Amino acid sequence: MKKLVTPFRVGLLVLVAGGFLFGFILFTRKGGLGEDEALQAHAYFRDASGLGPKSRIQIAGLPVGEVESIKLEGTRAKVTVRIRRDVPVFEDATLAKRSESLLGDYLLDLNPGTEMAPPLKEGAEIRRVIDVQGMEAVFASLSQITSDIQQVTGALRDVLGGDKGAGSMERIVENLVRVSDAVDMTVRASSERLDAILRNVEGVSSDVRGITASNEQSVNNIVDNIEVITRDTREVLATVNKLVGNGGEADLKDSVASLKQTMSRLDKTLANLEDVTTKVKNGEGAVGTLLTDKRLGQKLSESVEDLSDFSSRLTGLQTEVGIQATYLMEQGSSKNMLTLRLAPKPDKYYLLELVDDPRGTTETQYVQANPPSSGEPVVQKQTITKESFKFSAQFAKRYYFTTLRFGIIESTGGVGADFHFFKDHLKLSVDAFNFSVAELRYPRIRTSLRAQAFDRLFVVAGMDDILNDPRRDTNTRRMLAGRDFFFGGGVYFTDDDLKAMLPVLPTP
Amino acid sequence: MASENAQNAESQPEQPSVLTRSIEGVGQSVISMVEELGHLITLGVDVVRWGVRRPYRWVNLFFQLDFVGVGSVFIVLLTGLFTGMVFANQSARAFAMFDAQSLVGPTVALVLTRELAPVFSALMVTMRAGSAMCTELGTMRVTEQVDALETMAVNPIQYLLVPRVLAGLFMVPLLTLLFDTSGILGAYAVAVGTQGVSAGTFITRTQQWLDPIDVYEGLIKGAVFGLAVTLVCCFKGFNATGGAKGVGQATTEAMVTSALSIFILDFIVGVLLH
């Protein structure tokens, strides 16, 4: 047992450590910017210090690439970069070097350029390059500011430094002292008069405040009235100016007379309108009843809602009309189908089909073989197969990539399922129907694969009646049951196609 | 009387001066070290030579892999966890002085994977397994069990030393990986949990700065240290003399020499890899 346990423990340790190593490699793997995933380009920098292989390239703070290599070419650094292909980069793109922090962590900011420029090609050069950014620019500005301050302090030193400068400073200070003394004396000498002036001003302002406080409402009214008067005056003047304009006084008289007539008619009209509205308000007449009867109003509202709901469903209904023709290999003839697909919602539709099936429909009749007067009736069973149209009416509901159908399939009850792949360009269908036909041992199972080769065109192939044994009509050799392969194609039109076609169709 | 004194002076050898004796002592130490290094290298060559010859002692090898590797897992995980936690705690405080806590993750990860993990893993193996190896081999030597093996035509180097050295060579890199993982997890817990570093920043910046080559460097160092440590311990134990006291003396020397060799080799391998 010991011999088994020891290798197991060692093996377990090796597996765990190997797992950790694998995890580390996955964790530290950088970007995966291979040739397929990334575009290679290069740029020339005068100063590439701080950059190195695997330095980040980012847009809006998000990594979109990395530096692949840096080589010296002449006096410039050729920086080769890889940028993810899913990031559109144009020929007028800009690469800017900047420091991410004070610690000298450098990266490249990529401005991808404008869509007006052609897309950047593999191996192309990014011509717009900004070498100095961020902290370096700040340091450069600080250096300039420091230099300016040094110049200012130097000038001050030249002016104020030395014995001459010290003498100037002394005189300036003395002058300032004298000025402040003079101001102080003036203020002291004029203080009584200033006090009197201030007292007068205070008294006047106090009176004004008393007047306005006691008649505040009146003052407000006066102000409002003045505002109204000025507005009315402005409007009247504008009207008069417009009326008088070019016509002069005679025109003005005519206009006033016409205005009087108009006003008279307007009075009559308003009287009539008042009469009508009074009747409506009192619930007289059809309109009055409609507006005043709550029950009628509620019913009308519900009717409008129903109508709106119906119209929205009708306008949201997607229609698809299709024709499909398939060649049945065992049967040796073709099967044609006209399809109408009504989809009120994207995940739900009704499928109506008119099918011309060479297998035809089978009817069973019971016929009395002997004359009615010849005793016990002999009943003979006759099975008649005839060519006729079949119809299908199915309800379908889609869940993810699967659509389930049920209803009438080729004039019998049945169910079906569709499996959609490649954005619905490929569809695998399975149908089961004819469950109750006594002549068939098993239900009719049909599978088909439909591929949409082009827009609105599709090809289809499959197998019909998979489970039943072959059976043919003895007279016509028409195949009645049994496995049959088929292939064919079809075309379908949607709402938009029909809308486009209808206006150009000839009218009878 | 005078002639008698002269005869005594001629009969006694002239004593060297203190300076001469000091220089001789230094020289003797250097010669001993070089001799010992030569014996160690010779033993290493013998281990390689006997390691590739049949019969292969698989049972012995797995026993030593288990003893050196599996037996050291717990102590290595624990050491790694606390090393990472302490390092993250201190570096976060230091980086906080200039608002650069985002560098805690990559700093800890780089230092652990490149340096601390292989060095500490090798030291743990030295203390736990190397001392045991040295004592066991020394005891076998002084009790003449090694001689008994030779008498039975069993090569003691192949039987005793090869599995131990191979175990050190293979297991220390694996323990280094465990140390890396537990250390970074410990650093994450401290940096994110107590120092206010955002989890996303810790992970993103670590991912940005850490390269697979850093992990590989630690593994290479781990293999070199494992080989050196087990070889030194086996050498000291295999050549122990003087009974129980000699075994103790050999174990002490093995520990000191192993620790020194780890740090010296760390520098040399680091220079060679960069």
Image: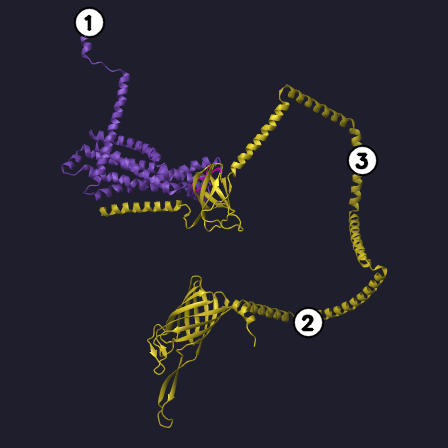
Whole-angstrom CA distance, mark 1 to mark 3, is 136 Å
Q: Is residue A383 above or below residue B194?
A: below
Q: Secondary structure at mark 1?
A: helix
Q: Main secondary structure of the magenta part?
A: loop
Q: Determine whether, in the image, residue B44 is placed left or right of residue A36.
A: left
Q: Is residue A96 above or below residue A302?
A: above
Q: Looking at the picture, tell me which residue is in the foreground, A107 or A130.
A: A130
| Amino acid type at mark 1 | Ala
Q: Which mark is residue A192?
A: none
Which residue does the image show at 40% across and 75% down from the upper left? A334
Q: Looking at the picture, tell me which residue is in the foreground, A459 or B29.
A: A459
Whole-angstrom CA distance, mark 3 to mark 2, is 76 Å
| Membership of A47 in magenta stretch | yes
Q: In the rendering, at what x and y percent does residue A117 appear?
A: 52, 50
Mark 2 Cα shell of 10 Å, populated few (<14), some (14-19), many (≥20): few
Figure quadrant of the C terminus of chain A: bottom right
| Membership of A271 in magenta stretch | no
Instruction: Identify the magenta region.
Output: A46-55
Q: Which mark is residue A200?
A: 3
